Amino acid sequence: MISQRHYILNFLNILNFLFKSVPTPLDQNLKLDADSGTKEYEPIHYHKLVGSLIYLTITRPDLNYPIGLLSQFMQTPRDIHLNYTKRILRYVSRTTDDDIHYKSATPIRLEGYTDADWADYKAHKRSTSRIVISIGSGAISWRSKKQLIVPLSSIEAEYKGAVVAACEAVWFKKILKDLDVSIKDPILLYCDNMSSIHLARNLVFHAPTKHIEVHYHFIRERVLIGDVDLQHINTNLQTTNIFMKALGADKLRQFTTSLGLSIINKLILRGSKESLPDTKSNEAEQTYD
């Protein structure tokens, strides 16, 4: 289990944050840009607030998208950006006990999810690759990054994203091997784009994709030797959706569960006030509703 509960509580205590909690960090399908809002806000305070929240993304993948979105307005933040930063704090105060839990009973197996948005940035038309790598019951790596070169099609964007996920997963497999943990099963990579899956499986030369750099065909070799198994997944079940848009409460909980985020009962010391039966029962029944 990895947790930043102590950091969250201290952070909220320093801010004297007592606002009502909310079930999601952002409004569903929210779109923000530098021109949103009406009044500019003091950058120094905004920098400190967002900077402290960025530290939480180390163990909280559910905060990756909202904090990443608001960190884009560090230069000239406006009132609306500050308001949504406060909303993230309200969400964090509600989910202080959310930890990534690695269950010992779960078989050790590497799995990954890969997705990409084609030309999702209006200014430069670059795409964004989003990946998640899990081992057993919990995520161990997640990333959302702009692609260096503007892709000419959605297939190319998705294919390049799959390559990034394959490289990351293969690297973790080598690390586990160095630790004497052998994984015999192929790495399962889930992608919601059938064309990129066919491109990775079919070694026939494709004229429409001849411009793709050679190093991006790394995934073809891994699929051929059986090291990586690229499988299709329905878009509605694609875990990387949590890194690409603001979700509703139900979808957010679905994907955080998929990432291994869950409430783990705290360790209770014998003789402490928390060890009383009624208190312990109340903690075990804690929910977000």
Image (cartoon, rainbow, N blue to C red):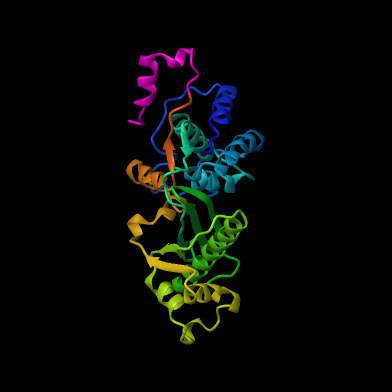
- Residue 46, x across and y down, in percent: 61, 36
Looking at the picture, how far across and down is residue 280, in whole percent? 39, 19
Q: Residue at x 61, y 53 (%)?
A: 179
Instruction: Pick the residue in front: 94 or 259.
Output: 259
Q: Is residue 175 above or below residue 256?
A: below
**In the image shown, does 90 or 84 lie closer to the viewer?**
90
Residue 108 lies left or right of residue 76; in this view the side is: left
Identify the image quadrant of residue 74: top right
Q: Quadrant of residue 218?
A: bottom right
The relative height of residue 121 versus residue 273 in the rendered view (above or below) is below
- Residue 121 visible: no
Image coordinates for residue 265, horizontal then vertical, percent: 43, 29
Relative placement, left or right, of 255 versus 270 is left
The magenta stretch spans residue 162: no
- Left or right? Give the position of 287 relative to 71: left
The furthest residue to the right: 44
Asked if one can make out residue 97 in the rendered structure from this viewpoint, the answer is yes
Q: Residue at x 51, y 61 (%)?
A: 129
Residue at point 62%, 39% (across, down): 51
| Numbered range of the magenta stretch | 268-289
Which quadrant does the C terminus fall into? top left
Image x and y of residue 283, in percent: 39, 23
Q: How many marks?
A: 0
